[in-house]
Structures are given as C-alpha cells and as structure tokens.
Image: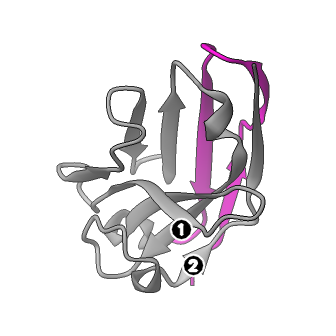
Amino acid sequence: QVQLVESGGGLVQAGGSLRLSCAASGRTFRNYAVGWFRQAPGKERECVVSIDWSGGSTYYADSVKGRFTISRDNAKNTVYLQMNSLKPEDTAIYYCAASVHGIATRTQYAYGYWGQGTQVTVSS
C-alpha cells in the first residue's frame, strides 16, 4: 500500500517557478514509477511528466518540455516536480500518482495510487 501527499502548490505570476513535492509512505515506493498529472476546469486530466522507478527514464508532455523537470529521491520517498517559466495555461490541480509497474508512462490506468492534489494557479 502506498499513500501519496502532494505539497508546494500556490499562486504565482506568469514566468515564475514552483516546486511540487510528492511524499510517499511505504517501503516499496522506490520500485514504483511516479507520474504527475493535472486537471484544469472543464478539461480532462492529463499526464504532465512521469519517471521510472530508478529515475533513469522519464516522459514529458510536449507542453512542458524544457520548462518542467521531474526528479526523485528514493532515500526520502519523495518525487519532485520543478516548474519554471510558468504560464497561465499551466493552471490546474496537480496530482501525483504511483504505478507498481515501475515504468514511466502517461497512461493513467497504469497508476493505482493517487494523491489528493495540489492547486497551481498562474496569473497573467
């Protein structure tokens, strides 16, 4: 069983930065892939980035390439999402999710564990 808690969301001006954290419980977390998803009002939830169990393989949505960076510290059971050059269209609730399969993927159904979400609002 894995429990996930996101933190680090907030209000920022366009061009600013935020770092989201996803803290996990469970000794086997290091074997899980982790994804960050977001859902804006009236839109479907989408995968923004994901990272495999080792940190050696990642996936980035085209909309965030070059601006967002995912990393993980398995010793701390934490995954980070560094978000730079934020745009108003990045405004959404951001969720982290864990996949027992261990492979970085954008497929939502691969993720069996989800956090409660953290709001990110980017003002223009």
Q: Is residue 71 left or right of residue 23?
A: left
Is 69 a magenta residue? no
Mark 1 / mark 2, whichever is N-terminal: 1
Front-lying residue, 2 or 115: 115
- Quarter where residue 15 is shown: top right
Q: Mark 1 points at which residue?
A: 97
- Quarter where residue 38 is shown: bottom right
- Marking on residue 113: 2
Q: In the image, what residue occupies the spot 32% across and 70% down? A: 31
Q: Where is residue 50 in the image (x, y as percent from the top left)?
A: 37, 56
Q: In which quarter of the image is the N terminus?
A: bottom right
Q: Which stretch appears magenta?
A: 1-27
Q: Is residue 17 left or right of residue 74?
A: right
Circles 1 and 2: CB atoms closer than 8 Å: yes
Mark 1 burial class by Cα count in 10 Å: few <14, some 14-19, many 20+? many
Q: How many labels does the image show?
A: 2
Residue 118 in view: yes
At label 1, the amino acid type is: Ala
Q: In the image, what residue occupies the spot 76% across and 65% down? A: 116
Front-lying residue, 56 or 26: 56
At label 2, the amino acid type is: Tyr
Residue 2 in view: no
Q: In this view, does 67 lie above or below 119?
A: above
Q: Is residue 121 above or below residue 62?
A: above
Determine whether the residue tagged by mark 1 lies in a helix, strand or loop: strand
Is 20 a magenta residue? yes
Q: Position of residue 67 (x, y in %)?
A: 41, 26
Q: Position of residue 104 (x, y in %)?
A: 28, 64
Mark 2 burial class by Cα count in 10 Å: few <14, some 14-19, many 20+? some
